[in-house]
Image (cartoon, helix red, strand yellow):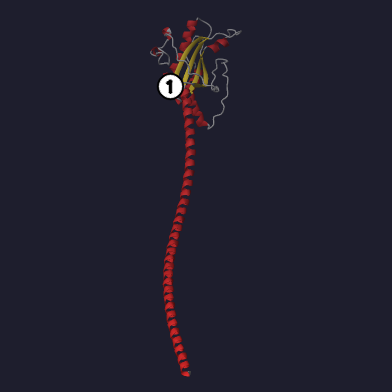
Amino acid sequence: MTRRLASLILCGGVAVLGSACATKSFVEKQVSATESKLTQQMTATETNLTLQETKLRETADRAGESRQAIDVADQRLNGLDLRVGELGARASGAETRADLAREATRDAEARLSQRLASRNRHRLLDTKFVYFDSGQTEIRSQDVDELENVAKALTADPNAILELQGFADSRGSDRYNRELARERVEAVMRYLVQRHGIELRQLRAIAIGKVALGAGEKESPEALARARRVDIRLLAPWSSWEDAQSQIRPAATEPTMTVIPAPRGPATISALPVQAEPTQPPQAARIDAPAGRRLPEFLKTITPKDLGGEE
């Protein structure tokens, strides 16, 4: 009995030990398999993490490059903004200069139009008087200085012209006084042409004839002396006068109106003030037929066209 029990216990222990050994080996196999799986998963996970880390680094590098490119683009844009601002300022300055140029052009066109419109208008610069003895046509010695001053003015300005108006007193016939007034005008013209070389184109002459006495005026020696004269009117083109004034003073002032007084006696009157409004171009000289034997040979060769008149 005891032996059987001992045998049974021994066999049972052996069986238990055998089953225990079998269980341990199974467990070890399972653990090894699990460890292998875990190792593979960890390796795969580490590989994935490495790949992701590499991708993240590449993404970060690309982001850095993109940021640098953006910074460079911002700098370029800032430079372009500055250039655009400079170009805008230059364009504004150019537009301002263009406006000024257009304004200057319009002003120049207006001045040119005014000059063209006023090319035949003249301004009275001075009026002088040369007096003659009764029935005479010779220039008196006391009137030479007046003619010298007139000749200097004509020589200084080739565009200036001289308007000569001849008069006689109320005695005698109209024809005689007209011829006498014409010869007095011709005497003045001859003096200017022969003594100073004044061109005929600068001379405009007309013989008015006798001067009628005013209302209530008596035929006194003084009144007759005032009538025996040649009025000398010095005229200059309006544009030439404006040019001369612009050179004298930058801003032209308002011209004043001055009334030219009538001659009071045989003494000459000189350096009269300038009148304000421009005068129309003087009428061309109309020289009548030769005045008989008293007409010089020099004037016989002068035609009305030479004196600025019509044929």
Report the number of numbered marks: 1
- Of 35 and 297, the residue lying toward us: 35
- Can you name the residue that lies furthest to the left here? 301
Image position of 86 with respect to 62: above or below: above
- The residue identified by callout 1 is 196
Q: Amino acid at mark 1?
A: His
Residue at 43% over, 69% down: 45
Image position of 17 with respect to 96: above or below: below
Residue 224 x/y as whole percent: 55, 10
- Of 188 and 114, the residue lying toward us: 114
- Can you name the residue that lies furthest to the top here? 173
Image position of 84 with respect to 242: above or below: below
Q: Is residue 137 visible?
A: no
Q: Is residue 208 visible?
A: yes
Residue 18 x/y as whole percent: 43, 85
Per the image, label 1 sits on a secondary structure element best described as: helix
The quarter of the rendered structure image containing the C terminus is top left
Label 1 crowd (10 A; few <14 / some 14-19 / many >=20): some
Residue at 48% over, 39% down: 95
**Quarter of the image holding residue 227?**
top right
- Can you name the residue that lies furthest to the front here? 1
**Quarter of the image holding residue 308?**
top left
Residue 119 x/y as whole percent: 46, 23
- Of 166 and 114, the residue lying toward us: 114
